[in-house]
Image (cartoon, helix red, strand yellow):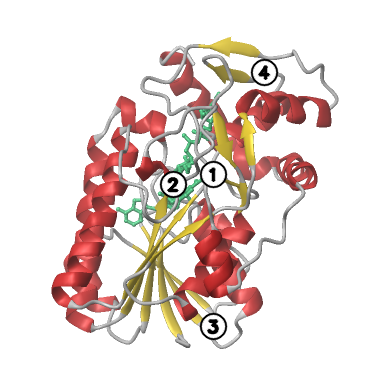
């Protein structure tokens, strides 16, 4: 068992990274976290506000900055790498920042890992495996071939391959996890679930892409955090673990559940233009993580997780309001 004391969490002011920082502060009192975050449009210091200053330190900076990494990595025993450009629609409109942050940024972190001999955990996505047909009984496993579809997912796939090559060639102590779609507090309003909740809260009709039958495999972000902690501390070096909680649902079912939970008619939404290259279905088989490490998700009731999330956005309008208008303007320009 690896017992880290000083970890760097890249992207710790984003959605999933900040939830992981909260998880570590709440559950592992001996661990100090240095958050390294560039505070792009997706990063928000409010996400880690109020955490004890002797436990969490924020360094505002770019993972592509090798000199900065030379200054901060020594003295830490692990890097947990969440920072990324994360949104598919943005990657279709302008792929360049995805190449820089997701590919070059991972390269820089791997070089720092090599130089300072720290443990490295790489956060990735099920999207590297491409998509499945709706009627395919198969789910993704650790041995599914890579087949990414979008500029976003291809840069994540590239970053995973860099990790594997650096591990084999230089003997780095790394692990990779590929997780399915997360939901929960602090998710940016550009993403599907927060966009629809905040549309309803602002009197705008929710927007559903294409035929709405695309399937995503939903997991609560706190369950993602517990899985990452387990892999960081007990995972086998050089291994990949898939993270998922058997949460397959079609977009139209999720949207109707949101509408009903918020007291609207389940048909009170707009059909909009489909996403180019839109992946049909993702599905994770997390048997390896469950059997080898004994991981189990806590949030297995999607309806109640969704209700908590709706309540969080209802109660935290001051958090999402500043980003809402600009996000919707961008979508409107894309006809979505
Ligand atoms: P997010 O967009 O909410 O947050 C990304 C964070 O990274 C932001 O705080 C941003 O400021 C920071 N960042 C971006 N570029 C940076 C740079 N060059 N240097 C330093 N910081 C930078 O993303 P998210 O949804 O929380 O995703 C986090 C990670 O999890 C990503 O690696 C993503 O690929 C992966 N992932 C996401 C999901 C999901 O459902 N959202 C599922 C599986 C895996
Ligand atoms: O599978 C993991 C991935 O999940 C992560 O790697 C990505 O970082 C994360 O953004 C997410 O990608 P998706 O493209 O699946 O998530 P998004 O929230 O953008 O969309 C979810 C589904 O909802 C997708 O099929 C597109 C659809 N959609 C999305 C929006 C924003 C709509 O129908 N309407 C919308 O307004």
Residue 204: which numbered mark, if any?
4
Judge left or right: residue 45 versus residue 118: right
| Residue plotted at (56% across, 59% down) | 224
Up the image or down, 80 lies above or below 303; here it is below
Residue identified by numbered label 2 = 126
**Mark 3 and mark 4: Cα distance apart in space:** 42 Å
Residue 54: which numbered mark, if any?
3
Can you tell which of label 2 and label 4 is closer to the viewer?
2
In primary-sequence order, the first of circles 1 and 2 is 2
Judge left or right: residue 253 versus residue 150: right
Contact between labelled residues 4 and 3, with CB atoms less than 8 Å apart:
no
Contact between labelled residues 1 and 4, with CB atoms less than 8 Å apart:
no
- The tally of labels here is 4
**Mark 4 and mark 1: Cα distance apart in space:** 24 Å
How far from the left and from the top, in percent, is residue 238?
A: 31, 72
Residue identified by numbered label 1 = 181
| Residue plotted at (69% across, 27% down) | 253
Contact between labelled residues 2 and 1, with CB atoms less than 8 Å apart:
yes
**Mark 2 and mark 4: Cα distance apart in space:** 31 Å
Q: Is residue 287 visible from the viewing direction of this image?
A: yes
| Residue plotted at (59% across, 18% down) | 207
């Amino acid at each position: 068992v690896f017992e880290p004391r000083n970890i760097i969490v890249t992207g710790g002011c984003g959605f999933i990274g900040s939830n992981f920082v909260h998880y570590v502060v709440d559950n592992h009192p001996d661990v100090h976290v240095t958050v390294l975050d560039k505070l792009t449009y997706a990063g928000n210091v409010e996400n880690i506000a109020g955490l004890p200053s002797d436990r969490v330190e924020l360094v505002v900076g770019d993972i592509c900055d090798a000199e900065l990494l030379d200054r901060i990595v020594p003295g830490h025993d692990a890097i947990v790498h969440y920072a990324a450009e994360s949104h598919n629609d943005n990657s279709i409109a302008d792929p360049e920042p995805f190449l820089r942050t997701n590919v070059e940024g991972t390269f820089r972190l791997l070089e720092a890992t090599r130089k300072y001999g720290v443990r490295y955990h790489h956060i990735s996505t099920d999207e590297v495996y491409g998509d499945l047909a709706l009627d395919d009984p198969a789910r993704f496993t650790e041995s599914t071939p890579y087949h990414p579809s979008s500029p976003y997912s291809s840069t994540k796939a590239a970053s995973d391959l860099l990790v594997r090559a650096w591990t084999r060639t230089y003997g780095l102590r790394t692990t990779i996890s590929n997780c399915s779609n997360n939901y929960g507090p602090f998710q940016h309003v550009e993403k599907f679930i927060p966009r629809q909740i905040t549309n309803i809260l602002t009197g705008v009709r929710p927007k559903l892409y294409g035929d709405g039958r695309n399937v995503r495999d939903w997991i609560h972000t706190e369950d993602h955090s517990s899985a990452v902690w387990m892999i960081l501390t007990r995972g086998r070096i050089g291994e990949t673990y898939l993270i998922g909680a058997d949460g397959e649902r079609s977009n139209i079912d999720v949207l109707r559940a949101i509408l009903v939970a918020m007291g609207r008619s389940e048909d009170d939404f707009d059909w909009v233009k489909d996403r180019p290259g839109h992946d049909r279905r993702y599905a994770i088989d997390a048997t390896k993580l469950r059997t080898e490490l004994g991981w189990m998700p806590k949030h297995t009731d999607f309806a109640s997780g969704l209700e908590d999330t709706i309540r969080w956005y209802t109660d935290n309008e001051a958090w999402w309001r500043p980003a809402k208008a600009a996000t919707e303007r961008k979508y409107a320009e894309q006809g979505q």
